Structure formats: structure tokens, C-alpha cells
Image (spheres, rainbow, N blue to C red):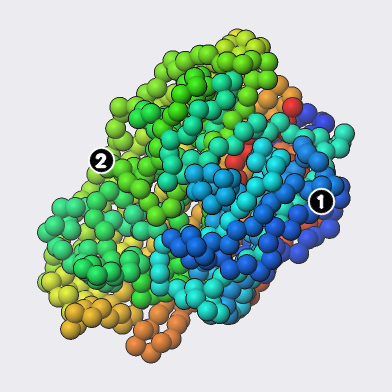
Amino acid sequence: MSKRKWSRYLSKVGAATLAATMAFAFASHAQAPPMNRLSVEPRVPRLGIVPCVVELFQDVNTGYFAEPMFEPEFEYAPPPGCPGPWAKVIFSIDLRGPGTTNIANVTFSLGDERRDDRFATTLLTAGAQYNAAQQSWRVERDITEYQALLRQARPGFARVTDPYFRDPYWGDDIPRASGRMIFYPATPAQPTPEVPDAVVPVTQTASTVDPLPHNIERAYLDVYGQLTNFWFSCVPVNAATSWPLLVNTPLAMGDHVQQAGDGTGQGCAGSNYRDVIVRIDGIAVGTAPLYPWLNSDLNLRFQRSVDVPVPTPQSINLMPFRIDLTPYAALLSNGAAHAIEIRYAGVDDTLRGAFDDAHLLLYLDKGSTQITGGVTRNTLEGTPLEATTTRNDWTINGIQLTGDVDRQYHRQYEVSGYVNTSRGRVDTTIKQEQSLTSTQWVSLLGYNAPADHDYAQIVQITSITDRTTLRQRGATVLAYDSIRHHYPLRIIYTASGGTPDVVPVLKRASAYVEQGHHQQGSHTRPAGAYADRLYANFVGSRTFDAMLGTYSGWKGARSHYFYDNAGSCFRERVTWTREDLTSHTQGEGCPDGINRVRGFAHPDGSPDDLGWLR
């Protein structure tokens, strides 16, 4: 949608927005300092009332992946001076690391039954890319919708969830964290929004959930998905079979750490499409697009390829994707245990990744003890992903192999169902369409010379997901939501070297990356309408001469823009050359040149059920 059309659209829906929602004041009338000097991620908007702050932990060791004995536990208790329910709750984390360039992906969770992972609910997955220019990072998330977890004391933990063992997390280099929750008490002007009545974790270790409440009228699943391998760079299987060096070269994109019995290859073969598919009792019920999350190292030997000093989108704050399971609310209410399974799906396979996590958010019908209903339509189950290869051309000119590959993937489905509530029958219809287009150009100069060759790849993908949700009681529309997620990515990558004497050697590498996280939504409720849009973009480049240990062409830019029809405007942008910022602007293009965001807005793009719009 063009800027002019978007402005007209905002004016239309803005006129219909309930005036009472404007009670959620702007976070500030003065320019707040950046949350981090080297990043542009927005703070979670504050409310114009004095909050209660609960300090959870101070400067704790965040442990090590797969080593639960090192997971630092903390104790959460509701703030005694601010009894719930609350108008807003914010989870704020400070990550601190060494002055060297290292990575830490840390997951913070609240649990129960002490250290049992089956009861752990993820609040935030954050990744700080420590470097000499910035050794500490702040990451925040609006957890107002998780109030059901916060009503009673419970243990929590912070755990490094980076599955790679290459970074020195021992000794002085162990990442440390401090965390707090910020509670805003409800007031007549800023009341408590409608929030889920129950939050239930769904983890890798326990996908079967015990019997749930019998009166579920709405259900959602927040899914955290992260595949650390470069799935979007995979070449077709027939090419890898004909020219094995495509996937056996240590120069291809990848950061696989060689283990006993492994080869040195960094490439991959097969489909370059992945999404998350969710099944209940074996039936496919919903999907989530997978953000093409970039590990900091495009190649194991080209470390921190382009994201130093500024990280790429979602690197320091991984966003969950919300799947609406309301058509299955009656099934989940039937008193039986249910298997809820999360898998990464390609063209013809499913797999578990290094990290995935999810939790159910349940809204209950207070006037009913037993919800009944059923699923009326599900075109996802049994329908395969559409995959089309329109070009797969490989040519040899002397010692150079080149390939041009164009592929398209498409998934479209509808899931509908109803629940019989104490207020009558409510029907929900969800329509979702996912498409990913991919173009690749690959060059292997010395395609049969493992000891010394040059590798190059240009990857460009466009991932778009459109979803509409209609919930109605008879002819009355209770909610209509339309949202688009757009994940563009372009990488130009080159490397030279090989495996002389069987030991991988990188002589030179270069990378150029363009990546975005774009989101646009419009939402209608009986009380009014709300629309917002988000554009987060990154562009960065760097060339590494491994023989000399020098860098060139090291520069980039990162921006984060957010707008809504309630007057919110957030614009922040940084540029850099080498490790030094060359500019950091705030509010340019916003009214009065100041960032202002309504207290109910989600400028980071995190899920929002709009419980405040009522």
C-alpha cells in the first residue's frame, strides 16, 4: 500500500476508533534516549502513571545450552503494593557480556513445579551480540497478556539457548543478565484490558497437555521458531548430487561446527522453504511463517559477518508468531489430554529444530461450565505445500560451474469452527495464505578442486503471509483482523579457499545483506477500529581478508519505523562505518520530530489481541 493510500486508510479507520482508547497517553512528550546506543528497537511504551517494579535477578550467570545444572533460577512474586489485575506489565532485561565480539541467545521463562521444563513458559528470547562498542543491551517485551502467570509466586530461569559451542561462555566471558517486571496498576482512565484467563506451555519435552479448562471460548498459540541453519540457501538435490563440492565445500554459507565423524562442508541441499506447522492430536490446525533469522556468522570462518556493531532484525528480540486455534476450542475443552505438536515443515519433510517453543493463551466463558461446538472446515489437513521450480539451470565453462535457480512455494487454507457459549453460538473463520519466492545464483570456480576454489552465491527471498480472521455471533461481527507479514532477504556472498591437507582454509570472504521485517494490520471491534504498520530494515556489508586479518567495505544502516491510526509515530535509524556509528537519528519524519507511541501499541511487532479496544 502506498504512503498516500495508507494515510487515507488510517484517516477512515481513525474516525471510527473509540475515543476512550485515547486515554492511553503517549509514552512521553519528550524525546526519550535510545534504548540501546547501537540499535533502533523501540522501548515498550510506558503509561502515564507510577508503576511498581519487581526486581527479579541481578547480574546472574545465564548458564550454558543443554546444561540445566547451570540454569540460574529466580523467584517471582507479585508486587505486594500493586495487586492485579494490571493495566500493563513489561518485562525488561539487561544483558551484559565481554568486550570481545561474542553472541548470547538467552531465553527467560516462568515455570512451576520447580525445575520441570514441562511447566516453563517463555517470556522472552533475547540475543545480545556483545562487542567492544557495546557490552550491554536492554531488551523488553509487553507481557500484559500473560497476567494469568503473574497472579501467584513461581520460579523462573534464564538459559542460554544458542546451540553452538564455539563461543567462550566460561570464565569472564559468560553472559550475565539482570531482569525486572514493571507493573502499572489499573485506573479508571487506563483500565485493565481483556487478557487470557490461562497460559499453558507447550514445550519440546512435553507436547501433550493435560486436560484443559472445559469452558474455552477462544484459544491462541504463540510460537517461537528459530532454525539456525541457513535453510534459505540450500541448492537443489540434483545439483548437489552432480557436483558434491556445492555442499561439501567449507566456503558455503553455514556455521556448522564439525563434530566427530562430520565433514567440513557448510552447504545444504534440498528445499529452501521452511515454516512451522502445528498439529492437535495428529491433525494439522495452523502454520506460522519462519522468519529467516540470520546467525551472526554467515560462515563458520567469517565470524560476525555483517552485523557488527549493529544487529539484524529480530536478532536481539525474537518475535513469536500467534496462531489462532479458536476453531478447535470445543475440542480442547472436552476434558481429554491433547497432543499439541510443533514441527518445522519443508516440501516433503518435518523436523525438530535447535529451538522452538510455544504456549497456549486461553479465554474462558465465565458463564459456562462446558463449551461444546465443532470444526466445520479444515483445508490445511491433507493438503501438501505447493512447490514449483521454474528454473534450475547449471552450466560449466572451463573450471567454473554456475547455476540459476528460481523456486516458488505456496500454502493456502481455511480453518473454521464454532463454540456454543453462554451468550450464544460464535463462529470463527481463519483464512491464511503463505508464499515464498526464491532466486539463487551460484558460482563454483574450481568445481572439482576441493583444495583451492572460489564460491559465490546470491540469494533473494520474499516471504509474505496474509491472514484474515472473522469472529461473529449471528450477524454481529465480534472481531475482524487482517494482517500481513513480509520478510524480505537478499544476500550476496563470496569466499575463496578450500581444504588443502584436509584442513579447511578461508582466504577471503565478503558479504552484503539486506533484510526486513515488515508488518501491516487492520483490526475491527464493536468498540472501534485500529490499524498499524511496522518497517524494520537492515543493510550491511563487510569484506574479510583472512590471510592479512583485515576488513574493508565495512558499513551499514538499520532502521525501525512504526505508525498507527491513534497518532503513534516512531522512527529511529543508525548508520555505521567499521565499528563506529556515523549517525543515530530519532523522530525524523514524526510530528515535531519526536517519537511518540500510545501506551497500548506494540511498536516491536509482537502479537496483540487488542484487549484494550473494548
Q: Amino acid at mark 2?
A: Asp
Residues marked 1 and 2 touching at CB (< 8 Å): no
**Which residue lies most toward the bottom here?**
548
Q: Nearer the viewer, mark 1 or mark 2?
A: 1
Q: Position of residue 312 (x, y in %)?
A: 52, 62
Q: Position of residue 392 (x, y in %)?
A: 20, 51
Q: Quadrant of the N terminus?
A: top right
Q: Distance between the Cα atoms at labels 1 and 2? A: 51 Å
Q: Quadrant of the C terminus?
A: top right
Asked if residue 511 lies left or right of residue 396, the reply is right
Number of numbered labels in the structure image: 2
Judging depth in this view, the residue of 291 and 393 nearest the camera is 291
Earlier sequence position, callout 1 versus callout 2: 1
Q: Which residue is mark 1?
A: 52
Judging depth in this view, the residue of 472 and 219 nearest the camera is 219
Residue at point 68% right, 20% down?
366
Residue at point 81% right, 35% down?
191
Q: Identify the mark at residue 65; answer none if there is no mark.
A: none
Judging depth in this view, the residue of 259 and 322 nearest the camera is 259
Give the class, few, some or many, for how many residues have Cα within 10 Å of label 2's Cα (few <14, many ≥20): few
Q: Which residue is mark 2?
A: 348
Asked if residue 367 lies left or right of residue 323, the reply is right
